[in-house]
Image (tube, coloured by chain):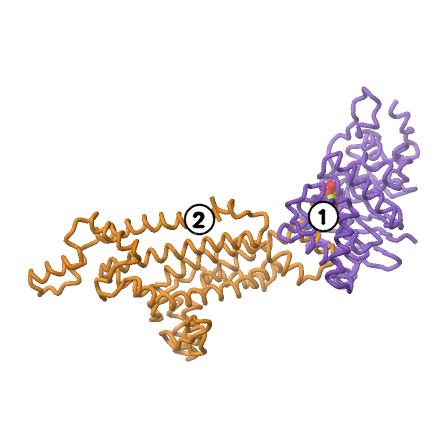
Chain colours: A purple, B orange
Amino acid sequence: MSLLQIDNLQTHFFTSAGVVKAVDGVSYAVDRGEVLAVVGESGSGKSVTGLSVMGLIDAPGRVVGGAIRFDGREIAGLPNAEMRKLRGARIAMIFQDPMMTLNPVLRIDTQMVETILAHRAMSRSEAWALSRDTLGRVGIPSPDERMRAYPHQFSGGMRQRVAIAIALLNKPDLIIADEPTTALDVTIQAQILHLMQGLVEEERTALVWITHDLSVVAGFADRVAVMYAGEIVEEARTDDLIAAPRHPYTRGLIGSVPSRNLRGRRLAQIPGGAPPALNRPEGCRFAPRCAFCTEGCERPQELRDKVRCWRAAELPEYAEALA
Amino acid sequence: MVFVIRRLLQALFLGLVMSALVFAGIFAVGNPVDILIDPDATQAERARLIAQLGLDRPFHEQYFIFLGNLLQGDFGNSFVYNRPALTLILERMPATLELAFAAIVIAVVLGIPLGVYAGLRHGTPGSQAVMAGSILGFSVPNFWQAIMLIMVFSVMLGWFPVSGRGEVGTFLGIRSSLFTLNGLHHIALPAINLAIGHLALVIRLARSGTREVQAQDFIRFARAKGLSEPRIVLVHLLRNILIPIVTLVGMSFGGLIAFAVVTETIFAWPGMGKLIIDSIRMLDRPVVVAYLIVIVVIFIILNLLVDLLYSLIDPRIRLDEARQ
Ligand SMILES: Nc1ncnc2c1ncn2[C@@H]1O[C@H](COP(=O)(O)OP(=O)(O)OP(=O)(O)O)[C@@H](O)[C@H]1O
Ligand SMILES: [Mg+2]
């Protein structure tokens, strides 16, 4: 049994315009010491899935179905007081924009120490020392001084390091990182990635790494789950997925990563955009954009053998398709 | 420090402009002699009084004499009471200050929790009730509201005295009616009357601030850290909504002092507002000028305090940038 196992999760938003099925039957699992990348276009439901695990879905949204098992225990629908004990202690989350995730009017030490004291019986000075050490661990120079600084005195990359340090404070079993490098420039991205990789290995933390950028995933994640329009359309080991993507959407994603392309070839692009959440196709949700769409694709698709495409087996090999 | 000095110079300049304007204004309105002197007085008596008050000199000369005296701390004597104008004002200032202070405390102590509640529970009947109340409080005319308060709470229910200031107590060398029970009993209604409009404003600001801050990532992150709801609201949210509220409080405190006139009149509160109304009616120029200079000084001090508070609340604001 994995540390985190999501089964057929459904999180809907009941808006005045209609029911937005942001997450519509998502299942994935991640174990200790494992990195699962969740990849997909904007609006595919990656964040909402992560927030559902955290129990942080606000009205008008609600987890309406499915199971979220964490360490053998069902946590979907747990009372808020119970969820609060898990959040920040056993499950931590890091968000996309490091400029926005730290409170601008509170010092770093305040924001760190409170995270420890919310969960552990520890003296303030012990909590302070632990915070400082953690700040050092994520590569912030002269942590003693920096503890007393305010967020605006840090660069974006450094702020994301602070957020990571906060996530690590209580030695969580699981970290959900929601596009933590998207807002950073490429060299900083690589540094943060490297840092996270080391930390996760050391502590054998389970990591769910949400991103819309497939190029980040190779060499970092053990497995990849690809999301499209509220569903997982394909899941595979990272190497397999990159070498031999099976779902047409995944093929399109990989085709649009620059480094994957042979020199001189034009970047493949998936035509069109994701369907609006309120008005999705009846059958295969990717069908309107799919190069392989035929008769039969108007049926709803099931996840079979970890691909949500009834034609996956008969499609040409990816390498052939490229040629 | 540069900042404070610049502020003081600014104050000086404003005070100067202010005094010139008021001086000219009252000069234009009429001749105080017409009001001050008994119509039956003889021509000789009239001339003597005019010379005594210095009103026979040309306007600019009068103004420069006034400025010269001002530099020595002399605001001149009231034409009416024949006592130093500044003394008259300072005598009545505590009554007005305590009234304004009580009103601000009521507005803030009730307004912030109500506004935050309305923001957090947006869309619920409780929140809508608070907002309806604030619209009402905002739109009822002050004088009518004062009369209603007196009718209901003093006349019909008999809970509060109808008018006047109560006993004065001394605490830390400050004499105020806030320090005795009888004084508090007297100040309650006028303070509430003065507070209601500002209470409504504080509620609206706190509510919109709460709604805005609540949607920010750092609140979500605070929740993801597993902090308790009270800690999130009291520490993470509250500090972030305080800036506009501090601004409002600073500005309206000045306003309350300067314009407590209606309330002071209706509740027969012996403050500066009543004095100034009477002085304007009597064209008692020294008192009016001194009063306005005092008000300018109060406004400047309040502004300074507000800016200092800003930098305490929000570390991103550096003092010298706060208000150029
Ligand atoms: N509070 C809300 N009310 C209504 N709909 C919402 C709300 N929050 C999210 N959604 C909808 O849920 C869907 C999934 O959103 P989500 O944030 O999970 O996407 P994402 O995959 O994380 O995209 P991105 O890459 O842009 O972060 C979107 O269609 C969005 O419109
Ligand atoms: Mg997202």
Classify mark 2: helix, strand or loop: helix
- Residue A323: name its quadrant: top right
Q: Residue at x 82, y 54 (%)?
A: A172
| Residue denoted by label 2 | B5
Extreme residue in the bottom direction: B158
| Residue denoted by label 1 | A20
The numbered disc on residue A250 is: none
Classify mark 1: helix, strand or loop: strand
Crowding around mark 2 (Cα neighbors within 10 Å: few <14, some 14 to 19, many 20+) is few
Q: Type of residue at label 1? A: Val
Circles 1 and 2 in contact, beta carbons < 8 Å: no
| Residue B210 position within the rendered picture, expressed as x and y whole percent measured from the top left | 59, 55
Residue A40 visible, this angle? yes
Asked if residue B286 lies left or right of residue A35, the reply is: left
- Residue B142: name its quadrant: bottom left
| Residue B248 position within the rendered picture, expressed as x and y whole percent measured from the top left | 48, 55
Asked if residue B30 lies left or right of residue A98, the reply is: left
Extreme residue in the front direction: B72
Task: Kindly tell me whether mark 1's CB lies below 8 Å from ligand 1.
Answer: yes
Q: Quadrant of ligand 1?
A: top right
Chain identity of mark 2: B
Instruction: Classify B316 as above or below A78.
Output: above
